[in-house]
Amino acid sequence: MAVPDYEAKYLDDLDIMKFLEAEAVEFLLSSEGKVPLSSCQGKTICLFFSANWCRPCRTFIPHLVELHDTLRKRDKSLEIIFISFDRDEDGFNEHLKNMPWLAVPFDVTLHRRLIDRYRVDRIPSFIPLCSDGITVEEDMTGFIEDYGTEAFPFTRKRREELKAIDKRKREEASLEELLAHEGRNFLISADDRKVPVSELVGKTIGLYFCAYWSPPCRAFTVQLTEAYNNLVTVKDRGFEIVLVSTDRDLKEFKVNLNSMPWLAIPYEDRTRHDLCRIFDIKGIPALVLIGPDGKVITMNGKFIVSSYGAEAFPFTESRIRDLEAALRKEGEALPHQVEDVKHEHVLKLDMAKAYVCDFCKKQGRFWAFSCDVCDYDLHPSCVGMVKKDECFLQNTITATLQPEI
Ligand SMILES: [Zn+2]
Ligand SMILES: [Zn+2]
């Protein structure tokens, strides 16, 4: 293992086992009973501070169990030692039932001393000891949640390595590297097709981070579907979308995917989690657009698609600039305000992201003639138009009001 980082926290010169011996601890506990302290010799030791009453601890334990089992299968010399924040022995025993690793026997005073010694200020805390057994790494809970077994041996050096790999993937990875792995080279669709990732190479790709439980996601899915259908079904523009679900369970994922005409990373696949981390997704919905050359065009695809729809394709900066220039020109050609027979107030030229025209009842975007007094909008093209039946009605009224000769 690496030389301890100079920033690592130094305690006294006792390693954990010597410290426990000095505290008159004779053995550790495992699910099979007592284990001598010497059994930890030569292993990568990680201290796990946790409590049964703490929900984040209970949520974290299944991740840690999975990681522990996988690393053990790979024959990694990992030893986790649980140190309890529980207030009573029942809680401690209950908590220990879920753990396939070792524990320091229940002793509130000793636990308090260990907590102080390792300066633990929150739980869960997962603190790997450096190879000298004395210096410690910082809490690696978040690191483990982010990288799973890849995080082993839980050192700062390992974390820097993994971050560098992520950075490279974000900047220059191929689609295969991003979306597939040794065990899976395909994506799935709602109608149970398996599409090889290689079929996506050379297309413009949207990675769509979304969950069905989120109303903004469901609303954006509708807009994105409209753009997708236009680009793929109508125009065959070499565009594909891949759902990276953040749904809470498989059932929800299936409902979500069923509302979409595009592809998805299978729900049970860790790639979903990796992509969220690589692209640093902080909120959903999010749409990362990747060009035919495999390079990220924009992380802000959601804004672009909700603003310009399919018109924005191929989503490049120059395309967006052209669209904006065309819009400005269109606005310059329109009057600042109009009077219209269909409405009693003056209508002013306005830029609206989306509206429904009160004349033709169709969706509108960008330029609108809107009323300041009431909620009334018209497409510029609908100004001055009179409905046929209204014309007819007006004529009839005029006719009836004509004095009879
Ligand atoms: Zn209209
Ligand atoms: Zn009005």
Image (cartoon, grey):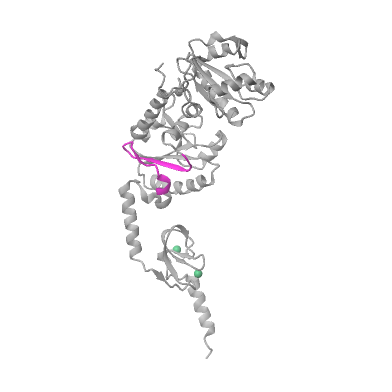
Task: Estimate the x, y position of residue 383 in percent, counting from the top left.
Answer: 42, 68
Task: Please state which of residues 215 and 105 is positioned toward the viewer in this rendering.
Answer: 105
Residue 286 among magenta residues: yes
| Nearest to the observer: residue 330 or residue 124 | 124
Q: In which quarter of the image is residue 201?
A: top left
Q: Residue furthest front?
A: 12
Where in the figure is residue 388, as x and y percent of width and height? 47, 71
130 relative to 48 in the view: left or right: left
Q: Can residue 97 be seen in this view?
A: no
Q: Give the range drawn in magenta.
A: 282-304
Q: Quadrant of residue 301?
A: top left
Residue occupying the point 41% across, 16% down: 1
Is 101 placed above or below 393 here? above
Tell me if residue 376 can be seen.
Answer: yes
Q: Is residue 236 left or right of residue 215?
A: left
Queried whether the magenta region covers residue 126, the answer comes back as: no
